[in-house]
Image: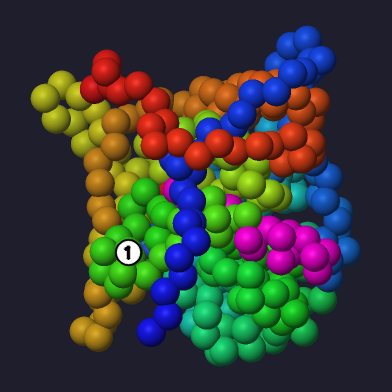
Amino acid sequence: MRLEEDIKLDYSDVLFRPKRSTLQSRKDVNLKRTYKFKYSKNEWSGIPIMAANMDGVGELDIAENLAEFEMITCLTKQHDIKKIKKCKNIKKIFSHISLSAGIKKEDFENLNEVLKEFSFIKFICIDVANGYSEHFSKFVKSVRDKYPTKTIIAGNVVTADMTQELILSGADIVKVGIGPGSVCTTRIQTGVGYPQLSAVIECADAAHGLGAHIIADGGCTCPGDVAKGFGGGADFVMLGGMFAGHDEGKGKLIKSNGKKYIEFYGSSSDVANKKHYGGLSDYRSSEGRTVRIKYRGKIRDTILNILGGVRSSCTYVGAPSLKQLSKCTTFVRVSNQYNETFVE
Ligand code: 5GP
């Protein structure tokens, strides 16, 4: 047994230290980034915030809204040719969507079919709960061999060693996060995880050293957390819970005591497993929660609120653009993040 003694941090363990700034207004902050990816050599420009490939979030109606802000949506694995054909604006939004696949044979077959018909889609997200298996790296390599010009996202991992391994196997972008998600129960079920801000800092450093990128996936509860992800060095920040509960996600609406809620569940929850795979196999346990979240109306308002927050973080630390945010970031460790006196 070995014990690592140095402290690892979550978003809630830090705040940005404000810095003297010459910026006049948050209006002047540029949130757009342009990246060129290591293997695909594709160039992408936009605001690097992503919707997670979860039911109620990684949906085409969400993608149409996010694309207006040049933000990316990772569609759920259930997006097959039939579903994508129904999207009239696919040719307009294609550069801001990613397909998703697990490592199951059916997933890969579906991916191949979709890419045959919609060959202009540029991102493939290969997504498993535990990105540490040798089998997974081999799978990433086989997808890279088949699709040399697609931008491949692979995850999830939380340490520098495995970030490097996935990049060397062919990933352009590594997805970082095990256990921080709003509807994730991995830490309770397995005791496995890594505080998200430290995971982001360490994996970003490893990826950037190899000319690749990372996504900080999960654990954001407010716009400040999104900014902290970027401040820690993330190239993209992926959101599940913060984008859930909106009209465009088409989740199940529940009315109770005159209030409206929307059902939201983890991709490995019982509900998701029943819906997509006819239930959980006996040897597995659910690692996701099902919750009711307050109905939040149109996603556009939420997007504007998040972008307003991130712009403001940039002005507080003197970063004229998102690109400069991590260079301008000094985090201070805190034991108390905010005053909860009037929080309901
Ligand atoms: P959030 O933004 O809601 O905090 O986190 C979103 C992320 O949680 C997703 O992108 C995905 O990586 C992770 N996630 C989604 N569903 C589940 C689940 O059922 N179990 C676990 N362990 N993680 C999940």
Q: Which residues are magenta?
A: 202-220
Q: Position of residue 35 (x, y in %)?
A: 82, 51
Q: Position of residue 180 (x, y in %)?
A: 42, 55
Q: Residue at x 27, y 56 (%)?
A: 289
Q: Is residue 58 magenta?
A: no
- Looking at the rendered structure, the number of numbered marks drawn on it comes to 1
- Quadrant position of residue 22: top right
On the rendering, which quadrant does ligand 1 occupy?
A: bottom left
Tell me: residue 147, above or below residue 287.
Answer: below
Query: Mark 1: few, some, or many residues within 10 Å (few <14, many ≥20)?
Result: some
Q: Residue at x 32, y 30 (%)?
A: 295
Tag 1, which secondary structure?
helix
Q: Residue at x 26, y 33 (%)?
A: 261
Tell me: residue 146, above or below residue 88.
Answer: below
Q: Is residue 86 visible?
A: no
Q: Is residue 205 magenta?
A: yes
What's under tag 1, amino acid-wise? Answer: Arg
Q: Residue at x 32, y 47 (%)?
A: 264
Name the side, left or right, on which 150 lies relative to 124. right
Q: Is residue 295 visible?
A: yes
